Amino acid sequence: MQPARSLQDKVFLVIKGLVMGAANKVPGVSGGVVAFVAGFYEEFIYSLQRINKTAFRLLFGGRFNSFFRYVNGRFLSLLILGMLISYFSVSKILDYFIQQKELYVWSAFFGMILGSIYYIAKDFEHWNRKTILSLVVGMSIGISISFLDPAQQNDHLLFVFVCGIIGVSGMTLPGLSGSFLLILLGNYVLLLVDAVNALYDTLAEVIRGDFSFTNNQERTRLLTVLTVFATGSFTGLVTLSHLLNYVLKNFKHITIAVIIGFITGSLGTVWPWKETVYKRDAFGEQLIDSSGQPVILNYRRFAPDLNNTETWIAVVFMIIGILIVLSLDWYGKMNRKKLEVN
């Protein structure tokens, strides 16, 4: 039975999808953190794991209403709608600000992650030997991932499918950034920039009645890559959701401790004061991948200059990031109070 949702709840769910979609596209930020902090993570995982043999029997048997109810379709459709809108609006705006005001964007997300750690840890009262060990393991993995060197771009469709499975992990595993993993795999620009922009341009042309993209080999290649990536992402979402639903039911406290560790470990990835280090050949020339983008080697992190005005503006953005998370916590508490009264 799907919970009844007011118009306000539906609008907020779409907005949460917007934020989740935008977070998934930012390297170092996990959309799963948004789901966790906004209070719909367990419902999200539960709804995804309902996409199983029973769901497909209902779908292919023509029982569409039963299928929709069984998979908690109202919840999933509103959330996915927000994510889709995000990829063609919020994500593009975010891309612009990352290029123009990178320090402030990273500062805001760093603050959001700090707020997320506080939010998840403040009510967790199950610290013991096992959960502390789980916290350390999660933190170690999160830190280790942030120091790995990115690979070269690879558009082989089987590898792109695997990238879809791995890249979607940011939605289901709070603290693990799917987009940062795509950078490590060498396919971030191909899959989350070039392919998404190709789809955006194609839809804009089709709306105008222009179907010339069918004769554009590069556009067709990118759309094929995006289709395979989306298929891999869907496969990863469903597969991981079944696994996570199991561990949340049977090892909830250990899982939450690992998540806290993951999120804490990811702080190094989102550290605002860093510069990109690009790969160079033996002659010192910057290497360029097949899409014309410079090949990222890693990031060099440094301490902020406290005498610089930009540093203090960045701190303000960090505080704003923390307040955004705390406001989500406040909204969740208000909603729970309403449900208790009703």
Image (cartoon, rainbow, N blue to C red):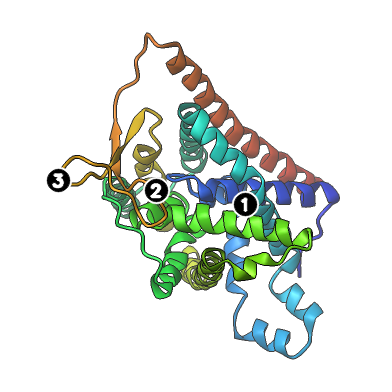
Residue located at (45% from left, 71% from top): 161
Q: In this rendering, would 155 be left or right of 144?
A: right
Q: Secondary structure at mark 2?
A: loop
Q: Secondary structure at mark 3?
A: loop
Residue located at (30% from left, 31% from top): 301
In contact (CB < 8 Å): disc 1 and disc 2: no
Position of residue 305 relative to residue 299, above or below, is above
Lower sequence index among marks 2 and 3: 3
Q: Which residue is mark 3?
A: 282
Q: In this rendering, would 17 be left or right of 256?
A: right
Q: CA distance from mark 2 to mark 3?
A: 19 Å
Furthest-left residue in view?
A: 282
> At label 2, which amino acid type do we have?
Gln
Q: In this rendering, would 76 be left or right of 285?
A: right
Lower sequence index among marks 1 and 2: 1
Q: Position of residue 106 (x, y in %)?
A: 46, 33
Q: Position of residue 234 (x, y in %)?
A: 55, 70
Q: Which residue is mark 1?
A: 87
Residue located at (62% from left, 74% from top): 50
> At label 1, which amino acid type do we have?
Tyr
Q: Quadrant of residue 264?
A: top left
> At label 3, which amino acid type do we have?
Ala
| Numbered badge on residue 293 | 2
Q: Position of residue 327 (x, y in %)?
A: 64, 33
Q: Position of residue 85 (x, y in %)?
A: 69, 52
Residue located at (16% from left, 42% from top): 283
| Numbered badge on residue 6 | none
